[in-house]
Amino acid sequence: MVKFDPEVLDHRRLTSHINRDMDLDETVAVEPGCVIYDHCKIGEGSIIGANAVLRPYTFIGHHSIFGTASVSEGHCDIGNFTTIHAQCHITQGVHIGSNVFIAPFFIASNTPEITEGKHGTGGPIDIKIKHTHIEYNTRIGTSVRMIPGLTIGHDALIMQDTLLTRNVPPYAIVKGGKDKVGVIIGWTNK
């Protein structure tokens, strides 16, 4: 986890738990209360919101925003000029392209299995992770959820409160129906 020297009372120690050996570009803004684990990379001009958590091997591109109280479970990458708004959950194996906008309360999962045992305390659990891909120029509304292993094609628009259960082609406009499962209702400019 993050290392810091309790004897040193600097701004970063008082507001965030950051690996002091991490090579953060001076243009990166890290807001109070966030936790950044070892082996993360954050591109120049990016902003990490208050109380955000970046677990190991989270890679964030240049000029991107990772919002307040959002969590990256690690082993994922986020492109340049991408905004992940407040209170989003980006699980392991999620790959997000450049120029993507994701509104609050987005959830991406990576396995359809609910494992047995003591979660977090029972030692390693062997699960198969299904990677999720969100391609460039995609826009995702508030409270969108998606099952593991899907791809959202570039330039797609996903309306709020939608559950995605299948791949979304490029340029598609998807809206949640009565049961909130996404249905393609149109196309953005091609």
Image (cartoon, helix red, strand yellow):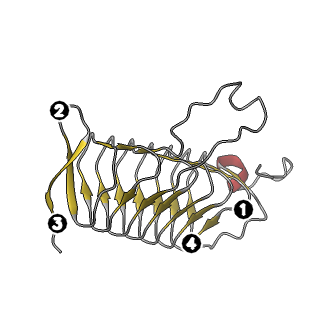
Q: Is residue 95 left or right of 104 when viewed as pictured?
A: right
Q: How many numbered circles are shown?
A: 4
The CA distance from mark 2 to mark 3 is: 23 Å
The CA distance from mark 2 to mark 1 is: 43 Å
Kindly indicate whether the residue at mark 3 contacts the one at mark 1 (C-beta within 8 angstroms): no
**Residue under pointer 1:** 39
Q: Amino acid at mark 4?
A: Gly
Kindly indicate whether the residue at mark 1 contacts the one at mark 4 (C-beta within 8 angstroms): no
Please tell me how crowded label 2 is: few (under 14), some (14-19), or many (20+) other residues with Cα within 10 Å.
Answer: few
Vertical relation: 25 (above or below) 5 = below
Q: Amino acid at mark 2?
A: Lys
Return the x and y of residue 61 as percentages of the image width and height: 52, 70
Mark 4: secondary structure: loop
The CA distance from mark 1 to mark 3 is: 37 Å
Mark 2: secondary structure: loop
Kindly indicate whether the residue at mark 3 contacts the one at mark 4 (C-beta within 8 angstroms): no
Residue found at x 66% / y 26%: 116
Return the x and y of residue 142 as percentages of the image width and height: 30, 44
- What label sits on residue 188 in the rendered view? 3
